[in-house]
Amino acid sequence: MKYYLTLLSLVFFISSSAFSQEKVVKYKVSSGETINQIAQKFKVTPYDIYKLNPDARTGLSPNTVLLIPTTGEAKKEVSETKTAATSGKEIIHEVQPKETFYSIEKKYGISDEALKAANPFLEKTGVQIGQKLVIPAKGSAPKTAAKPAKEKGAEKYVYHDVQPKETKFGIAKQYNMTVDELEKRNPDIVSSLPVGYRLTIKGTAPKAEHVAAETAKPAENKKPAESSKKAVTYMEYQVKPKETFYSLGRVFHLSQDELVALNPSLSEGVKEGMVLKVPAGYIAPAPIIAAQVPSEKPADSSVNKPVESTGGGIKIVDKVKSTENENVEIVELTKKRGVNERKKVVLLLPFNMAKVQSDTSGTANRIKNDKFLNMTLDFYSGALMAIDSAKTLKLPIDVAIYDSQETKTTSSIVSLVPKLQDADAVIGPFYQNNAEVAANMLSSSNVPVISPLSKDSANPIDNLYQTVPANDVIRNAVFDFMRSKNGNIIAVVDKKKESVINYIKQNQKGVAFASLTETGGLDVANLKSLLLPNRMNYVVMETGNTAMVKATIKALLDSQKTCQVQLVILEPNSTLDTDEISFDNLVKLKLMYPSVTRESDEQPVLIYEKQYRLKNKANPTTYATRGFDVTFDTMMRLMQGKTFQETADLMTTQQVDNKFQYYRKEDGGHANKGVYILYYDTDLTLKVAN
């Protein structure tokens, strides 16, 4: 047990050190400085600094000494700055991309008044790339401006009252300024942007006007909670391998132009290691290899005692509502009165502790490189959140967690069966064949076995429940939705996608295929001829060919003038993640696709994410949230005064990311058909269509 705790704690201290052979300089960090600012100062990327200073990834402290790789340009920059500070002579500075009044003044240790006095034209033009600025010697008296005093009158005061749904980025763009400049003029908005707040855009605000703005009538802002919800704050985000404008746009709900406006360095393209300024309200999923390690103790594989959970959990349910295309009620699960009989839930998780402890490369290295272990730890951290929630709700449930010691071909399930026969539900194992072994061995006891992660088609076993919808179920869901809207469905599929062509021909009768040319390209004229003017036209596009993707998108954009069209994909398409495909065009066509998870800003979901971050010091991954959803859903079903089997036949539920709509398969067993149909709306947000 102690050894495992050491293993978990070490994950936060793993880092790689790859020192290059280039020359370096030492730099002492000033209070408040960020990696972005330092990288800009030395004309290197944040990734270059991280390579030499791995610990800097966890944050910077004042007076920390960093090793900075130097280029000829960087050396010149350092020398120039020192000269300005010590020589007592003026120097000429050429404005570089991303530089502002603030960054230049901070670099040379001069005041705003001194810089503008030495360069009077800055009052009108502002800082522009390529300008030659006179940097006065430090300590020298400001030069008297050549203009007559009457021309130096008070700058005209311009203000802006913040409206609902406005952001700092949008306001700054409206007045041709940067977000940094807006925040510098209005320090109170750094952490939030309240609706009704009067921003100073230009000049000095009259005192009376500020008082009036601050004491605005309550009636003008009836929903104070809403204003804080709409406030925009920013965080730093480091670009991961293979990320593009499209993938970043999906995560942060920003167009390519908005990303570049916030981060001018992106004008040269997206590069791995860049540190970007992005809205903090949209949290990017952490990569699987960065383990979200829970603080609680996992069950010891040798003792197999139930895990003790701590308080602080929350209840995650969704309001009752009906989908438009089928009569399915999403039920809000709460504990039924009179249900006091204690239930037992068992989690079978593949910690594989024996392998971890015997790994000669060390436990820390194992955690760093073992993706399967990371996935397990993520799922476990989410399950613990669900256990805490059950304790907070005072549910009469006992939870035991055992190490299933899984590989694709082996597990410890057989030896654990005696401890599982009295369970009301078993969550796990992870591998499909191991889940089937457990279900077969527990079938005589009628214990439901819930397979939490496997996408494989299961053998017909009555007490086995698949929580991940199968691929054909996912595809069927989007076609069912399009038909429920009386849509005209057209397929654009290239010849290489034979499996998709066969699926549509065998399972989706009445879908028209757009013709292809002799060279395999799209026959645009034929596609347009298949569009109907009086119905919604859903165009299902399945191709990895960039030219075909571009041709399809262009044809649909042209056709929007005469008919309704919407672009649809059946599965993730990596071609859409390239910079060659405009994300804005995908939004214009309201790109739609089926998904087993959703994105939501509903209050219960936000509470879960906040609680997870407080508890684990990290954002929840997809696997962590699935761990919560599957575990919490299972426990709440047992609190309905019915067996798990009965609730599966009667109730459709919805948790943070996942929907659970179980159905009995014709050949036996249960599967989940809880699928979301998502689309990009014109405000760049993902919305649920069904």
Image (cartoon, rainbow, N blue to C red):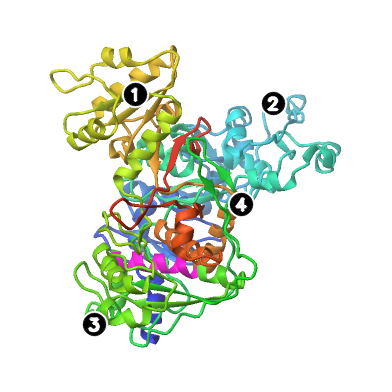
Q: Position of residue 599 (x, y in %)?
A: 49, 46
Q: Pick whichever, 287 or 351, lies toward us.
A: 351
* Marks 3 & 2, CB-CB < 8 Å contact: no
Q: Secondary structure at mark 1?
A: helix
Residue 278 falls inside the magenta stretch: no
Q: Earlier in the sequence, mark 3 or mark 2?
A: 2
Q: Pick whichever, 617 or 207, lies toward us.
A: 617
The alpha-carbon separation of the residues under discs 4 and 2 comes to 57 Å
Residue 375 falls inside the magenta stretch: yes
Q: Earlier in the sequence, mark 1 or mark 4?
A: 1
Residue carrying label 1: 553
Q: Pick whichever, 655 or 29, lies toward us.
A: 655
Please tell me the numbered disc located at residue 603.
4
Q: Looking at numbered disc 4 in the image, what kind of residue is underneath it? A: Gln
- 97 lies above or below 284: above
Residue depicted at 19% across the width and 22% down the height:
521
Q: Position of residue 572 (x, y in %)?
A: 32, 41
Please tell me the numbered disc located at residue 358.
3
